[in-house]
Image (cartoon, rainbow, N blue to C red):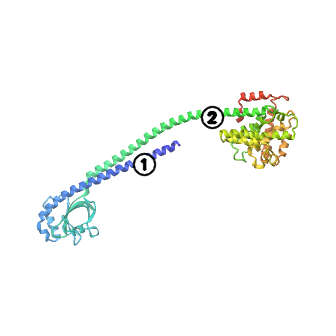
Amino acid sequence: MHLRNRWLIVVLICGIQLIAALGMIWYQLLSFEHTTISCLGNQSALHSQTIAKVVLEQLGIREAVRPTTDVAVELRQILEHSTLAGDRFVGVFDLASNQLFDARLGPTNQVPTAGHSLDIVDLETEEQISVNEWLSIPSLRFLKGSVQIGGVSYFVVINRLRNSNNALIVGQVETDVTSRFSSWMNIAKVVCFNGVLLLGFMTLFLITSILQKFENRLAKFHLQLQDMVEVRTSELSKTKNGVIFGLAKLAESRDNDTGDHLDRIRSYVVLLAREMQSSYRELDEQYIRNLALASSLHDIGKVGIPDAVLLKPGRLTDLERKIMQFHTTIGFDCLEAISDRIGSDEFLNMARDIAKFHHERWDGKGYPDGVFGKDIPLSARIVSVADVYDALTSRRPYKEPMSHEKSTEIIISGAGSQFDPEVVEAFKKIERQFKKVMTSCQSQLDDNAIIPAIARLQDALQAGATDELLA
């Protein structure tokens, strides 16, 4: 996984944890605030209840027969000559008229009630109760809760006036009760919020620092391991290429040829493949590297051909020609056996195709299976042109080398019959490069020089033709 993606996951996890921590702390603070405010409301209600008892005692028994307005007047008189209520609200609620009389202001100053009803939130059950409904139940004498009066919230106590549907209400403004606590709670919320944020960022910084160190160590270890793998892969590749090229040289050593046949074939197929890259998507660099190496095994089956046939200087009989043609099947079976032992491999598959099909013709008159057209693998169609050109331009004990111009003419004339027209078209564009390769290789040998087979094999193994092959 990419480092940036890992950091994104870390940030996401830390963010989720931070949000969860903030949510939990916020919930605890709100729960504590709600509980504390409820306790403060109960304390305020208890103080108001004490005042209400004193006021009820001063009103006396007459409250049972006097109108609500008269009670409000007398309450005002009581409060004017007493500091009993302090800053608390004292009033009388009349169920019949849905009017709330403020005892401090007098009976003519009514406090409007929302929806012609006065609703109170019970401090014990936290349920909303209509004072009208509460007064309709004669058995209920006392209620404490929170109520909205004139747009202001109060902690109140409601006491039923005996023998009537009216009630005495004594209360204190909620903000007066909770202001100090609320200010402390606001400070606590800010401190907790900032503290959690700070802790979250510190945690994120710590985790990313640890992750960065881990990534650095992992990257260093990865580079070391990659170097080791590259060294080992290079060694294995050199060993594989050396063995393959040596094997190809062994097959070539049984043929009457100079030592450069495989080198020329490799150069020719690389030239053709690169020229055809624009037409065939599969001709990428790896394909060309495999093709260059696999082409050296095109005649590996000749190791199974008897010397009397393989090394015969003159023209072969029909039977000898059939025996010679069998080298394609021998090479295929040999590489097939290797593939069965080590498993499927792109290089071995290509080498197997080349060994079997490089003598097939575009018109289907080739051997060993007589396949035609694009049923012949592309690698074999390319090697076929390179092999025929090299055979035409090379010296043999039984023939002289043919000129480049004559060989080129023969190759071009075979388009559509012996060779793939597209491969021949590519050959036409680069035939001067073919001539350059052919001339360069031949100039390194004397006209009559024939390198002994064992010497050619020894030179190939000592030279380790692996790097040159893939250069």
Task: Say which residue appears at 40% left-offset and 47% top-offset.
Answer: 18
Q: Is residue 78 left or right of residue 468?
A: left
Q: Percent x, y for residue 69?
A: 17, 70
Say which of 94 and 87 sits in front: 94
Can you tell which of label 1 and label 2 is closer to the viewer? Answer: 2
Q: Percent x, y for residue 371?
A: 78, 48
Q: From where the camera sits, is residue 454 visible?
A: yes
Q: Which residue is mark 2?
A: 233
Q: Percent x, y for residue 356?
A: 76, 42
Give the answer, above or below, for where 372 lies relative to 391: below
Q: From where the camera sits, is residue 467 visible?
A: no
Q: Which residue is mark 1?
A: 16
Q: In terms of secondary structure, where does tag 1 sit?
A: helix
| Quarter of the image with the C terminus in it | top right
Amino acid on which the number 1 mark rests in the picture: Ile
| Distance between mark 1 and mark 2 Cα atoms | 45 Å
Q: Circle 1: is it few (<14), some (14-19), or many (20+) Cα within 10 Å? A: few
Task: Say which residue appears at 60% left-offset and 34% top-offset.
Answer: 229
Say which of 377 and 371 sits in front: 371
- Kindly indicate the quadrant of the structure image that contains residue 426: top right
- Kindly indicate the quadrant of the structure image that contains residue 307: top right
Give the answer, above or below, for where 2 lies relative to 452: below
